[in-house]
């Protein structure tokens, strides 16, 4: 009885091939939980695409994608830092490209691994990692320079990308590696900078065909409950007669884990207020759907299962039924990933 991701592979792979064809120089990204599929699955899928490099998040993920069969270049996106043993060990690997985002780190690598393959990251409006214009180095010694990295915000600006690329190229010629530009804007940039361009793509590549992905949970138990009866770990009282439905999927899977959401509009603020009022009233909606509606949690999710509250004369489900569950793919660990 599992939390399951089922993938319609023909449709999923057709989307991948179409996007790769539209983005010359595309570099698939496989990091973290592998966007819900797992790093091993994505390494296998990336091997089928016409691309010579794969980007991972951290140094420790290199061994995972290689064990799954990836044998071409790997770009480590997290920048190198002193004391990171795993990342330092990879500096001597001829198939690994190391990200460098500080001038002092570049100097350290020049001394310890003078022939390492490096990519230099420029600071963007993200203000996460990267060198400022005044930091950009002119002398890389014998390091193998693989180009400049520009990691834009989610809705990247062609104007910002062009300005930063021009600044970098005025310092040193090299490939421009991008993230988060639209395909149309990337094509404009590609024809304007006069050097090789690469586009890292993760979310759009793996999650860009949502109709090919089905996420389901199994109904594990159904219990009738009367108003006032206590339930769950916290022994709260049932607010009325109904049913408790136990389904697979809990905190160990990443179910109901929340992250801050930017409040950019009145509607978003209204949704946040409404969710807060529901939570205060003990009716936090779960991501599980029964009979066409998301049902409230009876109490916070358990490790591997969740308790849902159902009103009415009938529960609407039986033990063994599979029900839809809305998952944030980048935070969910599925028990099964089935490629159909």
Image: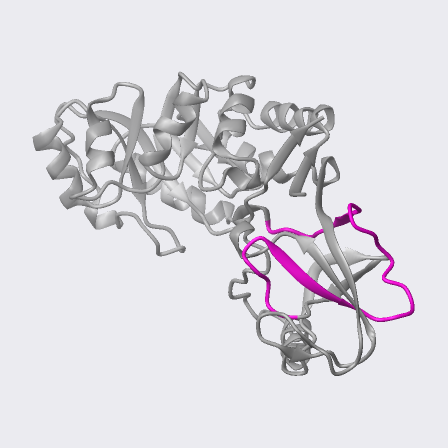
Q: Quadrant of the N terminus?
A: top right
Relative depth, front residue between 194 and 105: 105
The residue range painted magenta reads 299-328
Identified at 45% across, 42% down, the residue is 32
Residue 155 appears in the figure: no
Q: Is residue 328 left or right of residue 247?
A: left
Q: Is residue 169 left or right of residue 192?
A: left
Q: Position of residue 170 (x, y in %)?
A: 28, 36
Q: Is residue 303 magenta?
A: yes
Vertical order, 13 against 2 (above or below) = above
Q: Position of residue 126 (x, y in %)?
A: 40, 55
Vertical order, 228 against 329 (above or below) = below
Q: Quadrant of the C terminus?
A: top right
Q: Position of residue 148 (x, y in %)?
A: 33, 35
Identified at 40% across, 28% down, the residue is 64
Relative depth, front residue between 209 and 5: 5
Q: Is residue 173 left or right of residue 257?
A: left
Rendered image quadrant of residue 194: top left
Vertical order, 203 against 24 (above or below) = below
Residue 111 appears in the figure: yes
């Amino acid at each position: 009885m599992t939390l399951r991701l089922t993938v319609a592979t023909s449709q999923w792979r057709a989307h991948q091939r179409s996007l790769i064809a539209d983005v010359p120089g595309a570099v698939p990204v496989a990091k973290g939980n592998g966007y819900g599929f797992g790093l091993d699955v994505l390494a296998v899928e990336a091997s089928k695409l016409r691309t010579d490099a794969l980007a991972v998040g951290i140094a420790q993920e290199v061994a995972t994608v290689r064990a799954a069969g990836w044998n071409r270049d790997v770009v480590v996106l997290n920048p190198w830092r002193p004391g990171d043993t795993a990342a330092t060990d990879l500096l001597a690997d001829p198939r690994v490209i190391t990200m460098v985002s500080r001038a002092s780190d570049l100097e350290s690598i020049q001394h310890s691994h003078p022939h390492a393959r490096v990519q230099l990251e420029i600071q963007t409006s993200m203000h996460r990692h990267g060198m400022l214009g005044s930091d950009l180095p002119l002398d890389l010694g014998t390091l193998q320079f693989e180009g400049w990295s520009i990691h834009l915000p989610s809705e990247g600006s062609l104007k910002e990308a062009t300005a930063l690329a021009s600044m970098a190229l005025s310092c040193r010629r090299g490939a421009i590696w991008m993230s988060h530009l639209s395909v149309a804007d990337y094509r404009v940039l590609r024809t304007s900078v006069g050097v090789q361009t690469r586009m890292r793509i993760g979310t759009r590549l793996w999650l860009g065909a949502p109709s090919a992905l089905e996420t389901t949970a199994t109904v594990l138990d159904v219990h009738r409950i009367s108003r006032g009866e206590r339930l769950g770990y916290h022994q709260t009282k049932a607010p009325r007669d109904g049913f408790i439905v136990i389904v697979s999927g809990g905190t160990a899977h990443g179910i109901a884990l929340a992250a801050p959401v930017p409040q950019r509009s009145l509607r978003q603020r209204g949704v946040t207020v409404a969710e807060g009022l529901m939570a205060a009233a003990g009716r936090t909606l779960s991501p599980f759907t029964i009979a066409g509606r998301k049902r409230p949690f009876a109490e916070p999710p358990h490790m591997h299962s969740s308790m849902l509250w159902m009103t009415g004369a009938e529960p609407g489900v039986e033990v063994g039924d599979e029900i839809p569950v809305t998952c944030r793919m980048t935070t969910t660990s599925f028990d099964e990933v089935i490629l159909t």
